[in-house]
Amino acid sequence: MDRRSIGECATRLDPRAPSARTKLTKKLPAQGLSTVPNPNPSRHASCTAVIGLQWGDEGKGKVVDILARSHDAVVRYNGGANAGHSVVVKGERYALHLMPSGILFPGKPAVIGNGVVVCPETLLKEIDGLRARGVDTSGLVVSDRAHVVLPYHKAEDALREQMLSRGSMSDAGGAGGDLSIGTTKRGIGPAYAEKVQRATAIRVGDLLRPDALRSKLDLACALKARTLGALTNDAALAVAWDADAQFRSCVAWGERLRPHIADTVYMLHDMERAGKTILFEGANATLLDVDHGTYPYVTSSSTCALGIGAGTGIPPQKIGRILGVMKAYSTRVGAGPFPTELKDDTGARIRERGREYGTTTGRPRRCGWLDLVAVRYSAMINGATGLALMLFDVLSGFDELKVCTKYRVRGEITDRFPPDAHDLSVAQPVYETLPGFGEEIASCTDRAALPANAARYVAFVEEQIGLPVDVLSVGPDRAQTMIS
Ligand code: GDP
Ligand code: IMO
Ligand code: MG
């Protein structure tokens, strides 16, 4: 399928078309609050969200890239440079970290919302890298209220991980073993913690306010020298953070980013009022959500659809379509419970076929069978209206495919997901075994032409989750996508 026909198919997911949810609402009897007339029904629920339903790297970048052409703006609302979203266009691969994936559409607003933590150094490198490849980055807009990740946040991230890996504050190590989270060391947790602590936090808008910036940095650097010093006995690592140097960097970053900095809340509401459609690009994924994920082995933001309101200022009733993105199997990077993990040859085979190595850190991803208990939970938390089933081609060639449909927890069978890491660590998967398919499907362009056992797998997923597979992906390229 060429790029134009993919585009034509993608318009089937056009947010202006009535969604499944809208159709359902029409059937409901008018009662209670629903009898209050909608002041402007034509503008209702015109936004779409793309959210990962597992532990990240589900292929969100590819799905956003496909849907971006039928939307007027692409917006990130959470996370930071911990994300790594790959998009492959005509064999060219782009790895985006802070840049919304919509940047590959020239001039289209690609918005970094207020809920994101922005490392200006990384963002500027990304802008330069894309420009060097001929990509027009003029569409980038960064919220003046997004928070800035500074070098001391990255240092703190690394020091905390080092300390936690010893299981204790003492150099001799503790009895607790390795307690590290396995973060990306991009300073995400410390930057969000600073935001919540308030007084010393720097927002993107502060990069353009030298006086406020200077006084915040003086306070922050004095505090960091003490707190980071306390995290290590290594004198070289307990650097006295120099406020002058930080100030100079921040001012230089501000000058370069100045044309892109704006009040994105009013900008997005103005667009929405003008009938434009907005696509929200989730970073990280639901099972890494700070509230609803496998805590404490999570990231530090609201990664699921529930985070969109806080992270952009757009209220939830404007989001009509929530596409849950899932791999046809499971992966996880970093520490934390993973009930269907395969530490054997089958796991290694999935890793090699799926090229499961981190887009941000290059770490090998842990691999396992599809966990439908987890995905059902994520679909519920997000209010997903449909699914994008990704990396399906990776499952070709296995004699049989196992799918976890329930857990056994302390002898009891349950279909509920216990998100707390302690509770989840004792959950044992209960599998159903489906027949495998030997045929390669990477060039398949029509769902009706799928091998029978492949079609059976897709139908099983739809039935178990109770949602349609709207997007079926059989390779990294835009063209390797079936949209229904
Ligand atoms: P994201 O973080 O959710 O955007 O996902 P990543 O980009 O980190 O990881 C997904 C990887 O799978 C990337 O290397 C994609 O190019 C690749 N990919 C996406 N869809 C498919 C697919 O259907 N088949 C295969 N084989 N690879 C895919
Ligand atoms: P995308 O958007 C996969 C994981 C890290 C670690 C935990 C906390 O590409 O799907 P952090 O640096 O955020 O404090 O790390 O969260 N993690 C991801 N894993 N994909 C991601 O993003 C991730 N973002 C964070 O590996 O286990
Ligand atoms: Mg990724």
Image (cartoon, grey):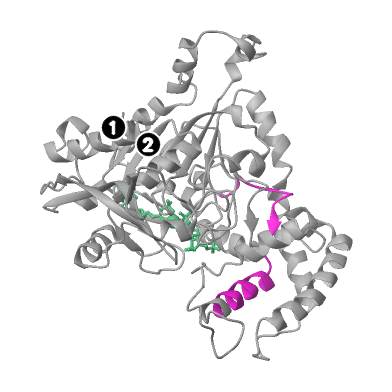
- 434 vs 360: above or below: above
Q: Residue 187 vs residue 56: left or right?
A: right
Local SS, label 2:
strand
Q: Which residue is mark 1?
A: 463
Quadrant (top left/top right/bottom left/bottom right) for the N terminus:
top left
Determine whether label 2 and label 1 are within 8 Å by CB.
no
Magenta segment boundaries in residue numbering: 137-162
Position in image of residue 442 (x %, y %) = 21, 46
Q: Residue 149 vs residue 46: left or right?
A: right
Position in image of residue 365 (x %, y %) = 36, 64
Is residue 363 something that shows in the picture?
A: yes
Ligand 3: image quarter: bottom left
Q: Residue 310 vs residue 56: left or right?
A: right
Local SS, label 1:
helix
For marks 2 and 1, give the CA distance.
12 Å
State the residue at coordinates (63%, 52%).
116
**Disc nearer the start of the sequence (2/1):** 2
Q: Say what amino acid the circle numbered 1 marks.
A: Glu
Q: Say what amino acid the circle numbered 2 marks.
A: Leu
Q: Which residue is mark 2?
A: 387
Neighbour tally class for label 1: few under 14, some 14-19, many 20 plus, Cα within 10 Å: few
Position in image of residue 171 (x %, y %) = 58, 89
Number of marks in picture? 2
- 422 vs 165: above or below: above
Q: Nearer the viewer, residue 281 or 291?
A: 291
